[in-house]
């Protein structure tokens, strides 16, 4: 059940962040990406490869950073020059594609969900 909610929040965060839905959508997107970045550290019942945990962390932080940048620009808290605005617009699809590629790679390899940690016969009385 927890994983279904995580996937729904992640998909909603991606859709809201990519579609430029406004300030509320960006705030939800930031929360979703931060939650996604913290998955390896919050779920102690599952085991992942070290590269997978690092990939989840980096892609989640990248998504949160891109969504935060979008939020700051929309709310006029960050004003950039027209040249920098063109650079951001040029590289934005690259970063979203990179992030989606990492997520797809994790899903295909089975590392996004990890495997359930086996009990080593240690009793915790």
Image: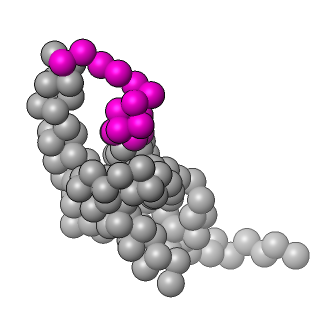
Quadrant location of residue 80?
top left
**In the foreground, 90 or 74:** 74
Camera sees residue 14? no
Q: Is residue 12 left or right of residue 122?
A: left
Q: Residue at x 40, y 30 (%)?
A: 76
Which contiguous range is marked in magenta? 68-82
Q: Residue furthest bottom?
A: 1
Give the quarter of the figure containing the C terminus. bottom right
Camera sees residue 39? yes
Q: Residue at x 60, y 64 (%)?
A: 44
Q: Is residue 1 left or right of residue 23?
A: right
Residue 57 image position (x, y, % from top left): 43, 46
Q: Residue at x 21, y 46 (%)?
A: 96
Q: For residue 49: magenta?
A: no
Q: Above or below — where is 59 with respect to 85?
A: below
Q: Is residue 70 left or right of residue 124?
A: left
Q: Residue furthest front?
A: 76
Residue 107 image position (x, y, % from top left): 27, 66
Residue 123 image position (x, y, % from top left): 78, 75
Q: Is residue 109 left or right of residue 118?
A: left
Q: Residue furthest right?
A: 125
Residue 39 image position (x, y, % from top left): 50, 58
Quadrant location of residue 95?
top left
**In the foreground, 45 or 125:** 45
Q: Residue at x 49, y 63 (%)?
A: 47
């Amino acid at each position: 059940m927890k994983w279904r909610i995580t996937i729904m929040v992640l998909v909603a965060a991606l859709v809201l962040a990519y579609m430029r839905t406004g300030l509320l959508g960006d705030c939800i997107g930031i929360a979703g990406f931060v939650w996604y970045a913290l998955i390896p550290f919050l779920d102690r019942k599952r085991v992942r490869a070290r590269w997978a945990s690092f990939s989840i962390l980096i892609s989640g932080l990248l998504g949160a950073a891109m969504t935060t940048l979008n939020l700051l620009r929309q709310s006029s808290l960050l004003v950039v020059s027209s040249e920098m605005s063109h650079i951001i617009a040029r590289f934005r699809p690259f970063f979203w594609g990179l992030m989606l590629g990492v997520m797809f790679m994790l899903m295909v390899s089975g590392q996004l969900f990890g495997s359930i940690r086996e009990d080593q016969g240690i009793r915790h009385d």
